Amino acid sequence: MRIEEVQSAAKKQRIATHTHIKGLGLDANGAAIGLASGFVGQAAAREAAGLVVDMIRQKKMAGRALLLAGPPATGKTALALGISQELGSKVPFCPMVGSEVYSSEVKKTEVLMENFRRAIGLRIKENKEVYEGEVTELSPEEAESTTSGYGKSISHVIIGLKTVKGTKQLKLDPTIYDALIKEKVAVGDVIYIEANSGAVKRVGRCDSFATEYDLEAEEYVPIPKGEVHKKKEIVQDVTLHDLDAANAQPQGGQDILSLMGQMMKPRKTEITDKLRQEINKVVNRYIDEGIAELVPGVLFIDEVHMLDIECFSYLNRALESPLSPIVILATNRGICNVRGTDMTSPHGIPVDLLDRLVIIRTETYGPTEMIQLLSPASVVAKANGREKISKADLEEVSGLYLDAKSSARLLQEQQERYIT
Ligand SMILES: Nc1ncnc2c1ncn2[C@@H]1O[C@H](COP(=O)(O)OP(=O)(O)OP(=O)(O)O)[C@@H](O)[C@H]1O
Ligand SMILES: [Mg+2]
Protein backbone atom coordinates (compact mmCIF):
# COMPACT_ATOMS: atom_id res chain seq x y z
CA MET A 1 0.00 0.00 0.00
CA ARG A 2 1.24 3.48 -0.81
CA ILE A 3 1.26 5.83 2.10
CA GLU A 4 4.08 8.08 1.13
CA GLU A 5 3.19 11.39 -0.40
CA VAL A 6 -0.51 10.76 -0.11
CA GLN A 7 -2.22 13.92 -1.25
CA SER A 8 -5.22 14.83 0.76
CA ALA A 9 -8.35 14.91 -1.38
CA ALA A 10 -10.47 17.02 0.96
CA LYS A 11 -13.61 18.46 -0.54
CA LYS A 12 -14.22 22.14 -0.92
CA GLN A 13 -16.73 23.30 1.63
CA ARG A 14 -19.75 25.44 0.95
CA ILE A 15 -19.32 27.80 3.84
CA ALA A 16 -19.38 31.25 2.31
CA THR A 17 -22.29 32.40 4.44
CA HIS A 18 -20.80 30.91 7.59
CA THR A 19 -17.35 32.49 7.61
CA HIS A 20 -18.20 34.27 10.87
CA ILE A 21 -18.60 30.92 12.65
CA LYS A 22 -15.29 30.11 14.36
CA GLY A 23 -16.39 27.44 16.80
CA LEU A 24 -19.27 26.84 19.19
CA GLY A 25 -18.44 29.66 21.61
CA LEU A 26 -18.53 27.61 24.82
CA ASP A 27 -16.68 28.29 28.07
CA ALA A 28 -14.45 25.81 29.92
CA ASN A 29 -17.49 24.18 31.52
CA GLY A 30 -19.22 23.76 28.22
CA ALA A 31 -21.76 26.54 28.76
CA ALA A 32 -22.65 28.79 25.85
CA ILE A 33 -21.21 32.30 26.03
CA GLY A 34 -23.78 34.92 24.94
CA LEU A 35 -21.95 36.01 21.82
CA ALA A 36 -18.79 34.11 20.98
CA SER A 37 -17.06 32.46 18.02
CA GLY A 38 -19.59 34.13 15.75
CA PHE A 39 -22.56 32.50 17.46
CA VAL A 40 -25.35 34.31 19.24
CA GLY A 41 -28.17 32.67 21.19
CA GLN A 42 -29.20 29.07 20.45
CA ALA A 43 -27.54 28.20 23.78
CA ALA A 44 -29.07 24.76 24.36
CA ALA A 45 -28.22 23.48 20.89
CA ARG A 46 -24.66 24.82 21.14
CA GLU A 47 -24.13 23.16 24.50
CA ALA A 48 -25.50 19.88 23.18
CA ALA A 49 -23.17 20.16 20.21
CA GLY A 50 -20.30 20.83 22.63
CA LEU A 51 -21.00 17.55 24.41
CA VAL A 52 -20.90 15.78 21.08
CA VAL A 53 -17.49 17.34 20.40
CA ASP A 54 -16.25 15.99 23.74
CA MET A 55 -17.58 12.55 22.94
CA ILE A 56 -15.95 12.59 19.54
CA ARG A 57 -12.63 13.59 21.14
CA GLN A 58 -12.94 10.70 23.57
CA LYS A 59 -13.82 8.42 20.65
CA LYS A 60 -17.17 7.50 22.16
CA MET A 61 -19.27 8.58 19.21
CA ALA A 62 -18.03 6.39 16.37
CA GLY A 63 -20.85 4.66 14.56
CA ARG A 64 -23.47 6.95 16.05
CA ALA A 65 -25.52 9.59 14.43
CA LEU A 66 -26.80 12.96 15.39
CA LEU A 67 -29.67 14.88 13.85
CA LEU A 68 -29.92 18.65 13.85
CA ALA A 69 -33.56 19.48 13.34
CA GLY A 70 -35.22 22.86 13.25
CA PRO A 71 -36.86 25.46 11.03
CA PRO A 72 -34.94 27.03 8.13
CA ALA A 73 -32.16 29.48 8.96
CA THR A 74 -31.96 28.56 12.63
CA GLY A 75 -28.29 27.69 12.38
CA LYS A 76 -28.17 23.93 11.75
CA THR A 77 -25.51 24.17 9.09
CA ALA A 78 -23.71 26.76 11.19
CA LEU A 79 -23.74 24.38 14.19
CA ALA A 80 -22.27 21.55 12.15
CA LEU A 81 -19.48 23.82 10.93
CA GLY A 82 -18.94 25.01 14.50
CA ILE A 83 -18.48 21.37 15.54
CA SER A 84 -15.95 20.88 12.78
CA GLN A 85 -14.03 23.99 13.87
CA GLU A 86 -13.94 22.77 17.46
CA LEU A 87 -12.59 19.40 16.36
CA GLY A 88 -9.65 21.03 14.59
CA SER A 89 -7.97 20.16 11.35
CA LYS A 90 -6.66 16.74 12.41
CA VAL A 91 -10.13 15.24 12.65
CA PRO A 92 -11.60 14.77 9.19
CA PHE A 93 -14.85 16.59 8.52
CA CYS A 94 -16.64 15.77 5.30
CA PRO A 95 -19.66 17.90 4.44
CA MET A 96 -22.17 16.89 1.79
CA VAL A 97 -25.72 17.73 0.79
CA GLY A 98 -28.35 15.01 0.47
CA SER A 99 -29.07 15.80 -3.16
CA GLU A 100 -25.42 15.14 -4.11
CA VAL A 101 -26.18 11.42 -4.36
CA TYR A 102 -28.28 11.96 -7.47
CA SER A 103 -25.57 12.05 -10.08
CA SER A 104 -26.19 10.51 -13.45
CA GLU A 105 -22.78 8.85 -13.53
CA VAL A 106 -22.22 7.33 -10.16
CA LYS A 107 -24.42 5.07 -8.07
CA LYS A 108 -26.06 6.71 -5.07
CA THR A 109 -24.47 4.35 -2.59
CA GLU A 110 -21.08 4.89 -4.23
CA VAL A 111 -21.33 8.62 -3.53
CA LEU A 112 -22.22 7.88 0.08
CA MET A 113 -19.43 5.35 0.42
CA GLU A 114 -16.83 7.78 -0.88
CA ASN A 115 -17.97 10.43 1.56
CA PHE A 116 -17.94 7.94 4.42
CA ARG A 117 -14.32 7.16 3.64
CA ARG A 118 -13.45 10.84 3.45
CA ALA A 119 -14.68 11.09 7.03
CA ILE A 120 -12.52 8.32 8.49
CA GLY A 121 -9.00 9.38 9.36
CA LEU A 122 -5.91 7.37 9.99
CA ARG A 123 -2.87 8.69 11.80
CA ILE A 124 0.15 6.78 10.65
CA LYS A 125 3.37 6.95 12.63
CA GLU A 126 6.51 5.57 11.13
CA ASN A 127 10.15 5.73 12.00
CA LYS A 128 11.92 6.57 8.82
CA GLU A 129 15.46 7.13 7.79
CA VAL A 130 15.66 10.70 6.53
CA TYR A 131 18.01 13.45 5.52
CA GLU A 132 16.79 16.63 7.11
CA GLY A 133 18.10 20.17 7.25
CA GLU A 134 18.06 23.69 5.92
CA VAL A 135 18.85 23.78 2.22
CA THR A 136 22.15 25.62 1.68
CA GLU A 137 22.70 24.65 -1.93
CA LEU A 138 20.53 23.36 -4.72
CA SER A 139 22.19 22.82 -8.05
CA PRO A 140 20.99 20.56 -10.82
CA GLU A 141 23.77 19.17 -13.00
CA GLU A 142 22.98 18.96 -16.68
CA ALA A 143 24.11 16.35 -19.16
CA GLU A 144 23.59 15.78 -22.87
CA SER A 145 20.31 13.95 -23.18
CA THR A 146 20.73 10.34 -24.17
CA THR A 147 17.08 9.56 -24.79
CA SER A 148 15.58 12.40 -26.76
CA GLY A 149 18.56 13.04 -29.05
CA TYR A 150 18.66 16.75 -28.54
CA GLY A 151 18.57 19.15 -25.64
CA LYS A 152 19.86 18.56 -22.19
CA SER A 153 18.57 16.64 -19.25
CA ILE A 154 19.33 16.61 -15.57
CA SER A 155 21.82 13.93 -14.63
CA HIS A 156 21.76 14.54 -10.90
CA VAL A 157 21.20 17.21 -8.27
CA ILE A 158 23.62 18.40 -5.65
CA ILE A 159 21.92 19.51 -2.47
CA GLY A 160 23.46 20.86 0.70
CA LEU A 161 21.66 20.35 4.02
CA LYS A 162 22.54 22.02 7.31
CA THR A 163 21.47 21.29 10.89
CA VAL A 164 22.59 22.64 14.25
CA LYS A 165 25.05 19.76 14.43
CA GLY A 166 26.46 19.46 10.96
CA THR A 167 26.19 19.75 7.20
CA LYS A 168 26.01 17.22 4.40
CA GLN A 169 26.16 17.40 0.65
CA LEU A 170 24.05 14.84 -1.20
CA LYS A 171 24.06 13.80 -4.82
CA LEU A 172 20.50 12.94 -5.79
CA ASP A 173 18.69 11.18 -8.58
CA PRO A 174 16.87 13.43 -11.13
CA THR A 175 13.49 12.03 -10.04
CA ILE A 176 14.08 13.65 -6.66
CA TYR A 177 14.75 16.91 -8.48
CA ASP A 178 11.20 16.73 -9.84
CA ALA A 179 9.92 16.23 -6.31
CA LEU A 180 11.95 19.22 -5.12
CA ILE A 181 10.42 21.38 -7.81
CA LYS A 182 6.94 20.15 -7.01
CA GLU A 183 7.37 21.09 -3.35
CA LYS A 184 8.82 24.44 -4.50
CA VAL A 185 11.96 23.96 -2.44
CA ALA A 186 14.40 26.86 -2.41
CA VAL A 187 17.63 27.64 -0.61
CA GLY A 188 16.76 28.57 2.97
CA ASP A 189 13.87 26.09 3.30
CA VAL A 190 13.86 23.28 5.84
CA ILE A 191 13.12 19.97 4.17
CA TYR A 192 13.51 16.27 4.68
CA ILE A 193 14.07 13.56 2.12
CA GLU A 194 13.07 10.00 2.94
CA ALA A 195 16.07 7.78 2.35
CA ASN A 196 14.15 4.78 1.01
CA SER A 197 11.52 6.33 -1.17
CA GLY A 198 13.16 9.63 -2.05
CA ALA A 199 9.97 11.44 -1.10
CA VAL A 200 10.61 15.09 -0.39
CA LYS A 201 8.74 17.10 2.21
CA ARG A 202 9.11 20.82 2.69
CA VAL A 203 8.68 21.56 6.38
CA GLY A 204 8.76 25.36 6.11
CA ARG A 205 11.06 28.32 5.77
CA CYS A 206 14.04 28.46 8.14
CA ASP A 207 13.27 31.02 10.84
CA SER A 208 16.53 32.88 10.30
CA PHE A 209 14.72 34.31 7.26
CA ALA A 210 11.67 35.31 9.29
CA THR A 211 11.83 39.04 8.59
CA GLU A 212 12.55 38.55 4.90
CA TYR A 213 9.09 39.27 3.54
CA ASP A 214 6.46 40.53 5.87
CA LEU A 215 3.41 39.71 3.84
CA GLU A 216 4.13 36.12 3.09
CA ALA A 217 1.85 33.42 4.48
CA GLU A 218 4.81 31.32 5.38
CA GLU A 219 5.47 28.87 8.15
CA TYR A 220 8.82 29.49 9.80
CA VAL A 221 10.55 26.60 11.50
CA PRO A 222 13.77 26.39 13.48
CA ILE A 223 16.82 24.79 11.94
CA PRO A 224 16.66 21.06 12.80
CA LYS A 225 18.70 19.67 15.68
CA GLY A 226 20.74 16.48 15.46
CA GLU A 227 22.54 15.11 12.43
CA VAL A 228 21.41 15.52 8.85
CA HIS A 229 21.09 11.76 8.40
CA LYS A 230 18.89 10.26 11.10
CA LYS A 231 15.78 8.34 12.07
CA LYS A 232 12.71 10.48 12.43
CA GLU A 233 9.17 9.73 13.49
CA ILE A 234 6.94 10.84 10.69
CA VAL A 235 3.28 11.38 11.42
CA GLN A 236 0.82 11.50 8.57
CA ASP A 237 -2.87 12.21 8.81
CA VAL A 238 -4.78 10.73 5.91
CA THR A 239 -8.32 9.61 5.27
CA LEU A 240 -9.36 6.23 3.95
CA HIS A 241 -10.43 8.01 0.78
CA ASP A 242 -6.94 9.48 0.38
CA LEU A 243 -5.57 5.94 0.55
CA ASP A 244 -8.17 4.66 -1.93
CA ALA A 245 -7.30 7.41 -4.38
CA ALA A 246 -3.54 6.95 -4.01
CA ASN A 247 -3.76 3.22 -4.55
CA ALA A 248 -6.26 3.11 -7.40
CA GLN A 249 -4.72 0.91 -10.06
CA PRO A 250 -5.16 0.93 -13.79
CA GLN A 251 -8.07 -1.26 -14.77
CA GLY A 252 -7.33 -4.77 -15.93
CA GLY A 253 -9.10 -6.61 -18.74
CA GLN A 254 -8.42 -7.86 -22.23
CA ASP A 255 -9.96 -5.17 -24.36
CA ILE A 256 -7.95 -2.93 -26.64
CA LEU A 257 -8.37 0.06 -24.43
CA SER A 258 -6.78 -1.60 -21.48
CA LEU A 259 -3.97 -2.85 -23.74
CA MET A 260 -3.34 0.74 -24.70
CA GLY A 261 -3.47 1.57 -21.05
CA GLN A 262 -0.69 -0.90 -20.40
CA MET A 263 1.46 0.63 -23.08
CA MET A 264 0.94 4.09 -21.80
CA LYS A 265 2.00 5.16 -18.39
CA PRO A 266 -0.08 3.45 -15.71
CA ARG A 267 -3.00 5.70 -15.28
CA LYS A 268 -5.04 6.09 -12.16
CA THR A 269 -8.61 5.02 -12.62
CA GLU A 270 -11.50 3.86 -10.56
CA ILE A 271 -11.65 2.99 -6.94
CA THR A 272 -13.31 -0.41 -6.75
CA ASP A 273 -14.85 -2.32 -3.87
CA LYS A 274 -12.06 -4.83 -4.13
CA LEU A 275 -9.46 -2.11 -3.73
CA ARG A 276 -11.28 -0.74 -0.72
CA GLN A 277 -11.40 -4.16 0.90
CA GLU A 278 -7.68 -4.58 0.37
CA ILE A 279 -7.01 -1.17 1.86
CA ASN A 280 -9.19 -2.02 4.85
CA LYS A 281 -7.16 -5.17 5.41
CA VAL A 282 -3.88 -3.30 5.40
CA VAL A 283 -5.34 -0.57 7.59
CA ASN A 284 -6.55 -3.12 10.12
CA ARG A 285 -3.14 -4.74 10.17
CA TYR A 286 -1.48 -1.35 10.73
CA ILE A 287 -3.86 -0.67 13.59
CA ASP A 288 -3.16 -4.07 15.17
CA GLU A 289 0.57 -3.50 14.85
CA GLY A 290 0.25 -0.10 16.46
CA ILE A 291 1.63 1.72 13.42
CA ALA A 292 -1.63 3.49 12.77
CA GLU A 293 -4.41 4.89 14.86
CA LEU A 294 -7.99 5.30 13.70
CA VAL A 295 -9.37 8.84 13.90
CA PRO A 296 -13.11 8.66 13.30
CA GLY A 297 -14.17 11.99 11.85
CA VAL A 298 -17.49 13.51 10.96
CA LEU A 299 -19.67 12.95 7.93
CA PHE A 300 -22.14 15.81 7.73
CA ILE A 301 -25.17 15.25 5.52
CA ASP A 302 -27.12 18.47 5.15
CA GLU A 303 -30.71 18.37 3.87
CA VAL A 304 -30.91 14.71 4.73
CA HIS A 305 -34.59 14.49 3.68
CA MET A 306 -33.28 14.50 0.10
CA LEU A 307 -31.93 10.96 0.56
CA ASP A 308 -34.16 8.06 -0.49
CA ILE A 309 -34.89 4.72 1.13
CA GLU A 310 -31.97 3.02 -0.63
CA CYS A 311 -29.55 5.58 0.81
CA PHE A 312 -31.10 5.33 4.26
CA SER A 313 -30.68 1.57 4.41
CA TYR A 314 -27.10 2.01 3.25
CA LEU A 315 -26.58 4.53 6.07
CA ASN A 316 -27.96 2.06 8.58
CA ARG A 317 -25.56 -0.63 7.46
CA ALA A 318 -22.55 1.67 7.21
CA LEU A 319 -23.10 2.89 10.76
CA GLU A 320 -22.66 -0.67 11.98
CA SER A 321 -19.33 -1.17 10.30
CA PRO A 322 -16.26 -1.12 12.56
CA LEU A 323 -14.75 1.56 10.36
CA SER A 324 -17.40 4.20 10.75
CA PRO A 325 -17.33 7.95 11.29
CA ILE A 326 -19.77 9.99 13.35
CA VAL A 327 -22.65 10.96 11.13
CA ILE A 328 -24.34 14.33 11.59
CA LEU A 329 -27.58 14.89 9.72
CA ALA A 330 -29.52 18.10 9.34
CA THR A 331 -33.02 18.81 8.13
CA ASN A 332 -35.64 21.52 8.26
CA ARG A 333 -38.53 19.19 7.42
CA GLY A 334 -41.19 18.09 9.84
CA ILE A 335 -43.28 15.03 9.10
CA CYS A 336 -42.90 14.23 5.43
CA ASN A 337 -42.62 11.53 2.85
CA VAL A 338 -39.62 9.20 2.86
CA ARG A 339 -38.29 9.44 -0.67
CA GLY A 340 -38.71 6.28 -2.71
CA THR A 341 -41.57 5.00 -0.53
CA ASP A 342 -45.13 5.97 0.26
CA MET A 343 -44.44 6.14 3.99
CA THR A 344 -44.43 9.38 5.88
CA SER A 345 -42.13 9.74 8.82
CA PRO A 346 -40.72 12.47 11.10
CA HIS A 347 -38.11 14.47 9.14
CA GLY A 348 -38.56 12.15 6.18
CA ILE A 349 -36.22 9.66 7.87
CA PRO A 350 -37.29 6.00 8.19
CA VAL A 351 -38.05 4.96 11.77
CA ASP A 352 -35.31 2.35 12.04
CA LEU A 353 -32.71 5.04 11.40
CA LEU A 354 -34.54 7.56 13.57
CA ASP A 355 -34.24 5.15 16.48
CA ARG A 356 -30.46 5.40 16.33
CA LEU A 357 -30.32 9.16 16.28
CA VAL A 358 -29.62 11.63 19.00
CA ILE A 359 -31.58 14.74 18.10
CA ILE A 360 -30.55 18.34 18.72
CA ARG A 361 -33.24 20.94 18.11
CA THR A 362 -32.53 24.41 16.94
CA GLU A 363 -35.14 26.91 18.03
CA THR A 364 -36.58 29.73 16.03
CA TYR A 365 -34.95 33.01 17.01
CA GLY A 366 -37.06 35.65 18.69
CA PRO A 367 -37.19 37.75 15.56
CA THR A 368 -36.08 34.98 13.18
CA GLU A 369 -35.84 37.32 10.27
CA MET A 370 -33.10 39.21 12.07
CA ILE A 371 -30.37 36.70 11.34
CA GLN A 372 -31.33 36.60 7.69
CA LEU A 373 -31.45 40.35 7.48
CA LEU A 374 -28.35 41.23 9.44
CA SER A 375 -26.02 41.42 6.46
CA PRO A 376 -28.30 43.57 4.29
CA ALA A 377 -28.97 45.69 7.39
CA SER A 378 -25.26 46.24 7.93
CA VAL A 379 -24.97 47.47 4.35
CA VAL A 380 -27.78 49.91 5.00
CA ALA A 381 -26.15 51.03 8.25
CA LYS A 382 -22.88 51.70 6.45
CA ALA A 383 -24.71 53.56 3.70
CA ASN A 384 -26.21 55.74 6.41
CA GLY A 385 -22.76 56.39 7.78
CA ARG A 386 -23.02 54.19 10.88
CA GLU A 387 -20.85 51.29 12.00
CA LYS A 388 -23.50 49.59 14.13
CA ILE A 389 -26.84 48.34 12.95
CA SER A 390 -29.76 50.21 14.46
CA LYS A 391 -33.41 49.27 14.72
CA ALA A 392 -34.22 51.68 11.91
CA ASP A 393 -31.83 49.86 9.55
CA LEU A 394 -33.51 46.55 10.31
CA GLU A 395 -36.92 48.03 9.71
CA GLU A 396 -35.75 49.47 6.44
CA VAL A 397 -34.51 46.14 5.11
CA SER A 398 -37.43 44.16 6.46
CA GLY A 399 -39.54 46.40 4.26
CA LEU A 400 -37.42 45.32 1.32
CA TYR A 401 -37.36 41.59 1.89
CA LEU A 402 -39.90 38.99 2.87
CA ASP A 403 -39.25 36.02 5.10
CA ALA A 404 -40.84 32.69 4.27
CA LYS A 405 -43.83 33.19 6.55
CA SER A 406 -44.75 36.64 5.34
CA SER A 407 -44.23 35.49 1.77
CA ALA A 408 -46.59 32.56 2.29
CA ARG A 409 -49.12 34.85 3.93
CA LEU A 410 -48.93 37.28 1.04
CA LEU A 411 -49.30 34.45 -1.44
CA GLN A 412 -52.43 33.32 0.30
CA GLU A 413 -53.90 36.81 0.44
CA GLN A 414 -53.24 37.49 -3.22
CA GLN A 415 -53.90 33.99 -4.49
CA GLU A 416 -56.38 34.98 -7.17
CA ARG A 417 -53.85 37.29 -8.84
CA TYR A 418 -51.31 34.53 -9.51
CA ILE A 419 -51.49 32.15 -12.44
CA THR A 420 -52.50 28.71 -11.25
N1 LIG B 1 -26.94 31.35 16.38
C1 LIG B 1 -26.36 31.94 15.33
N2 LIG B 1 -25.39 32.85 15.51
C2 LIG B 1 -24.80 33.45 14.45
N3 LIG B 1 -25.10 33.21 13.17
C3 LIG B 1 -26.06 32.31 12.93
C4 LIG B 1 -26.73 31.62 13.98
N4 LIG B 1 -27.65 30.79 13.45
C5 LIG B 1 -27.54 30.95 12.12
N5 LIG B 1 -26.60 31.84 11.79
C6 LIG B 1 -26.26 32.28 10.42
O1 LIG B 1 -27.49 32.50 9.76
C7 LIG B 1 -27.47 31.96 8.43
C8 LIG B 1 -28.49 30.84 8.28
O2 LIG B 1 -28.17 29.75 9.14
P1 LIG B 1 -27.98 28.26 8.63
O3 LIG B 1 -27.67 28.22 7.18
O4 LIG B 1 -27.02 27.57 9.54
O5 LIG B 1 -29.44 27.73 8.86
P2 LIG B 1 -30.00 26.28 8.66
O6 LIG B 1 -30.70 25.93 9.94
O7 LIG B 1 -28.97 25.36 8.17
O8 LIG B 1 -31.11 26.55 7.56
P3 LIG B 1 -31.71 25.57 6.44
O9 LIG B 1 -32.73 24.71 7.12
O10 LIG B 1 -32.34 26.53 5.48
O11 LIG B 1 -30.58 24.80 5.86
C9 LIG B 1 -26.04 31.50 8.21
O12 LIG B 1 -25.30 32.53 7.65
C10 LIG B 1 -25.56 31.20 9.63
O13 LIG B 1 -24.16 31.26 9.70
MG1 LIG C 1 -28.69 24.41 6.34
Image (cartoon, helix red, strand yellow):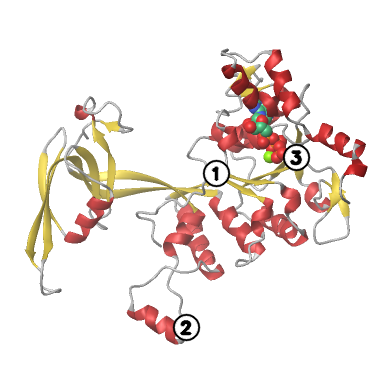
Q: Where is residue 138 in the image (x, y as percent from the top left)?
A: 13, 47
Q: In which quarter of the image is residue 298?
A: top right
Report the quarter where the N terminus lies.
Answer: bottom left
Secondary element at tag 2: loop
Q: Neighbour class for label 2 at 10 Å: few (<14), some, many (≥20)?
A: few
**Amino acid type at mark 3:** Val
Which of the labelled discs sits on residue 13, or is there none?
1
Nearest to N terminus: mark 1 or mark 2:
1
Q: In this view, does 238 lie to the left or right of 63?
A: left
Residue placed under numbered mark 2 in the picture: 253
Mark 3 vs mark 2, foreground winner is 2
**C-alpha gap between disc 1 and disc 2:** 37 Å
Asked if residue 26 can be seen in this view, the reply is no
Secondary element at tag 1: loop
- Taking depth in this image into account, of 84 and 225 the one nearest to the observer is 84
Question: Is 363 drawn above or below residue 262 in the view shown?
Answer: above
Mark 3 vs mark 1, foreground winner is 1
Question: Is 108 drawn above or below residue 214 in the view shown?
Answer: below
Nearest to N terminus: mark 3 or mark 1:
1
Q: Position of residue 205 (x, y in %)?
A: 25, 35
Residue placed under numbered mark 3 in the picture: 358
Residue drawn 27% across the image and 32% down it = 221
